[in-house]
Amino acid sequence: MTTTAELLKGAAELFPGEVVTSAHVRHIDLPSAGRFALITLDNGLDHTKPTTFGPQSLANLSDAIDQVEQEAADGTITGVGITGKPFIFAVGADLKGVELLKNHSDALAIGKGGHDVFKRIAALALPTFAYYNGAAMGGGVEVGLHCRYRTVSRALPAFSLPEVFLGLVPGWGGCTLLPNLIGADRAVSVIIENSLNQNKQLKGEQVYELGIADAIFEGADFLEQSLVWTAAVLRGEIEILRPEVDRGEAWDAAVARGRFIADSKVHGAAPAAYRALEIIAAVKDGDLEAGFAAEDTALADLIMGGELRSGIYAFNLVQKRGKRPVGAPDKSLARPVTKVGVVGAGLMASQLALLFARRLEVPVVLTDIDQERIDKGVGYVHDEIGKLLGKGRINQDKANRLKALVSGHLDKATAFGDADFVIEAVFEEIGVKQQVFAELEAVVSPTTVLATNTSSLSVTEMASKLEHPERVVGFHFFNPVAILPLLEIVRGEQTDDASLATAFGVAKKLKKTAVLVKDAPAFVVNRILTRFMGEIQTVIDEGTPVEVAEKAIEPLGLPMSPLVLLELVGPAIGLHVSETLHGAFPDRFTVSPNLAAIVKAGKRGFYVYAGGNPAKPELDPEVAALLVQGDTVLTQEQVRARVLDAVAQEIGLMLDEGVVAEAQDIDLCLITGAGWPFHLGGVTPYLDREGVSERVNGKPFLAPGVASVPA
């Protein structure tokens, strides 16, 4: 029979590039509680390189368990604890190695190897403790679940089981142990809901409130306080009483809620959430071994599927490419930004002012055509800062300082004379924006960067009448500004490196994912989405029923249907962008007469919602009366093929035009700016897997093996 050590040794050969985590054992004499063994997980790198578990790392932990197991048998220790290096507990499996696996048996070995090591912690004949001192994700969370007791730092910034988000299941005990610890409903929130909500992270306080941790301590002396608490537990002075888990109808209702969440998010298009829910449902009777076996099988199946490869591809785009923008000038060319100006005081401009004030912490001045608008914009920012204070996200001193940074002034010369960076957020009309920039150039310093938040207009044309067009740059945010990470930075034909470097420097301070984009109509996200939406609207105009056109896209598992997205963007904006792109590319982009009629009638979209429930959209009878349709009716399959072919064609043309450096930048834009699902890995891997890229363009977008199922 193969031992755990042999299993891990064989698996380690498949992971040649593993960043190995050590498991140091040291001993602490606890007051009146004996000698205690503390295992510290540490990969020897700084806190920006999180600790992970590859095969050799698991083997090292197994060796540490060998040691404490012997010490327990000898009676020389009274308990065992596990913690991490400063700021990091552990963030799970080594994904770089997982994507190298080629065989189902190797994938199964990884699942079993992790289980076998972690179960040894649970099997120790002494009390075991996990001290979540810093970021804990995936296998990091799960190793702690195998301990009898857990504490958490109030300063812990991120705690999650993100596997479903990436296309896996929490396969080292998460699906089995968590519902048996805190109940199925809370477990569904952590495993399914948070994962599918863009990998939402829990803070230390939430971990404690959910019942995952038995005690919570301040970050400054977290480990010391945890050990004091541990000693009290070992002395019998503290008894941990956990509420009984409801294994009746509440368990079934929780699984049903999880399925509803999965259906609403991925529409059955991604298996991971459903496999996780199957395991949660199966462990209702508390049979942990059966749950662990089911986790092994699900983990191996999903590792060998395309969803995980796509998830890892998307994860790497966001975590690596997104932090090192391709084509950005040397950062040493960037000028300092000590004051920001915002032209406009409407909702978008006010959101921008809030973001700049919070992230850059420099004075931000708004202008508009009258004092009433300015006061309203500044008032919005101050109100939002007040909300942050009310939620405890900032303290009173920080709130006062942020409010003092944001002001307004009617006179542009007074407002912007000493600004280093000025962004306009006015009406989307080229003449208006050219006038604004002409007025700005007359009052700002020669080195001030002039940025435009345009969503589709030419940055080059906008700057064409200026004396210094080289300082104009596109700075396209996505709404809601505070939530969506993407920032398309557009280089006009004359934009110089210093201005562009300054823009990228500002983007980094704003904590945005910046992608360099050529000055082309509608740039990246809006161009692709407009082509996508345009095909949907065209098939409706031609005669396909609205519900058929909508449902055709469901197998993609997009976060919302096309017409709901149109409602979010606003029909008027959608119409404007389609008109802009029709002007640039009349052979591919159409202007829907039905959409124009909807805008003219002042309708907010195609739908009304029964009882105000967003999950129950119904075609608005007034919109139905406006629709003028032809007699060409397509099936869902025909609609889907037509839409995907159009998107593949448009992306191919954009890459030929050099709108971005590579297909990976297209995917990064759609993931961070349009919520394209991680499980698809972006649009280009999906089009490659479905054979659309080859059919339309004669070749795939990505090299073989990138975000694809292993051969």
Image (cartoon, rainbow, N blue to C red):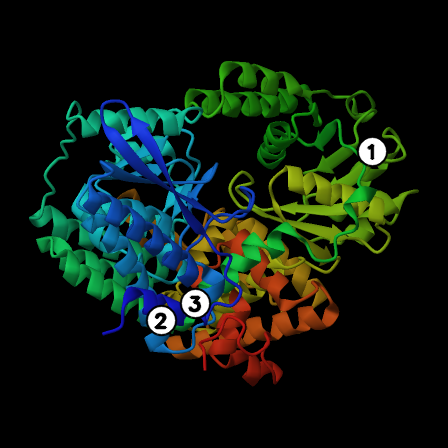
Look at the image and tell me whether residue 681 can be seen.
no
Task: Name above or below for residue 265 compared with residue 32.
Answer: below
Q: Please tell me which residue lies in front, 481 or 148.
A: 148
Q: Nearer the viewer, mark 1 or mark 3?
A: 3
Residue at mark 1? 440
Q: What x and y, as percent, mark residue 581? A: 66, 62
Picture disc at residue 12: 3
Give the quarter of the figure containing the C terminus.
bottom left
Amino acid on which disc 2 is placed: Ala
Asked whether residue 577 appears in the rendered view, the answer is: yes
Q: Earlier in the sequence, mark 2 or mark 1?
A: 2
Q: Quadrant of the N terminus?
A: bottom left
Residue 257 picture location, percent across and down = 22, 51
- Relative to 126, residue 640 above or below: below
Query: What number is the disc on residue 107?
Result: 2
Using the image as rendered, state which of residue 447 and residue 461 is in the foreground. Answer: 447
Residue at 52% from the left image edge and 52% from the top image edge: 571
Q: Amino acid at mark 1?
A: Leu
Q: In which quarter of the view is residue 639 placed?
A: bottom left
State the residue lying farthest toward the right: 467
Q: Nearer the viewer, mark 3 or mark 2?
A: 3
Element at label 3:
helix
Q: Residue at x 25, y 49 (%)?
A: 70
Secondary structure type for disc 2: helix
Instruction: Work out whether mark 1 precedes mark 3 in sequence or the reverse, and give the earlier one.
Output: 3
